[in-house]
Image (cartoon, grey):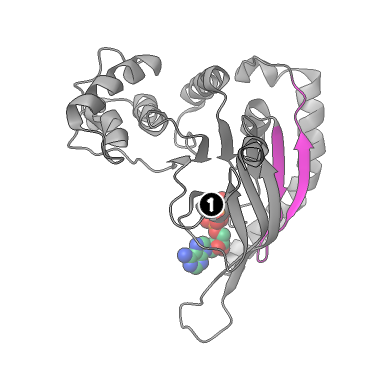
Amino acid sequence: MAEVAATAPALSLEGVTCTFPSPDGRSSGYTAVQDASFRVADGEFVSIVGPTGSGKSTLLNVAAGLLRPSAGRALSFGTPVSGINPKAGYMFQAEALMPWKSALENVAAGLEFRGVAKREALDQARPWLARVGLDGFGDRHPHQLSGGMRKRVALAQTLIVDPKIVLMDEPFSALDIQTRQMMENELLDLWASDRKSVVFITHDLEEAIALSDRVLVLSAGPGSRLIGEYKIDLDRPRDVAEIRMTPRFLTLHKEIWDQLRDEVLKGYAQTKLR
Ligand SMILES: Nc1ncnc2c1ncn2[C@@H]1O[C@H](COP(=O)(O)OP(=O)(O)OP(=O)(O)O)[C@@H](O)[C@H]1O
């Protein structure tokens, strides 16, 4: 058994279909994702791109154990996900910080949720604040921090519990481009030092390519399917701003965008229909 666990993927989705009931409960419901199967290896950084409404967040929710698929299943390190995935840390697009707590307390909260005593949690939170470049900002509350700083607090809050797989749903999309690129580089530095598995959801194909080992493409809904898988063979370590200017990046971008473009147009049309 131990041997199986050691080689099991960090995440494995097998034939996952998610159908949501219709609001009136009468029609057959809306199938967001159809028969999605993919694996994320231990230590791998995988991004999922797709048009709006293609089920990216839905797949991440299945991986996190927040949503039970209508068919198929998710496994994390060989264990079927049923209920909250204890191996996963989750970082959303929306602000998840508690406004009444300081930055330090917000980071510590990640541990307190898992039952660590407050004093111990605060002690462990201090080095994490430093790791995300916020040494000296521990007493500030979220409204006293910039958007980028708040993202760093959220990142530390996610990573402090030492998840084996990090699920990120457009975590930087609300940031301006410079802050966003800084955060992306910081994320890559943290990832390089700990080598956790990451599943990263984004609308932004450039961001996906710059960060990832592999990019998966979802088709437009309804019934979105995984229609493309691209290995990103760019050297590491990477600077996300510089890597965008390399010829290989541009080739990869063109190749993936050729497939994604039509789906984005279909997805846009769908949003007008629904
Ligand atoms: N709880 C729900 N009930 C009904 N429909 C839902 C529910 N959650 C998601 N959907 C629908 O499923 C589809 C996929 O949603 P999802 O949020 O996963 O897409 P997405 O690719 O992450 O979108 P975006 O890029 O716009 O964030 C959408 O059409 C959405 O309206």
Which quadrant, please, contains the N terminus?
top right
Q: SS of the residue at dot 1? A: helix
Q: Give the residue displayed 78% in from the left and 46% down from the top.
A: 228
Relative placement, left or right, of 90 versus 2 is left
Q: Image quadrant of residue 35?
A: bottom right
Q: Can residue 55 be seen here?
A: no
Q: Which residues are magenta?
A: 214-234
Extreme-front residue of the structure = 1
Residue 36 vertical placement versus 123 (above, below): below
Pointer 1 residue = 57
Give residue 245's position: percent from left, percent from top: 72, 18
Relative placement, left or right, of 173 versus 114 is right
Q: Image quadrant of residue 100?
A: top left
Q: Image quadrant of residue 160?
A: top left
Which quadrant, please, contains the C terminus?
bottom right
**Callout 1 amino acid:** Ser
Q: Give the residue displayed 30% in from the left and 13% down from the top.
A: 135
Residue 199 vertical placement versus 211 (above, below): below
Is the residue at mark 1 in contact range of ligand 1, meaning its CB lies under 8 Å from it?
Answer: yes
As rendered, which of 1 and 159 lies closer to the eye? Answer: 1
Residue 62 vertical placement versus 126 (above, below): below
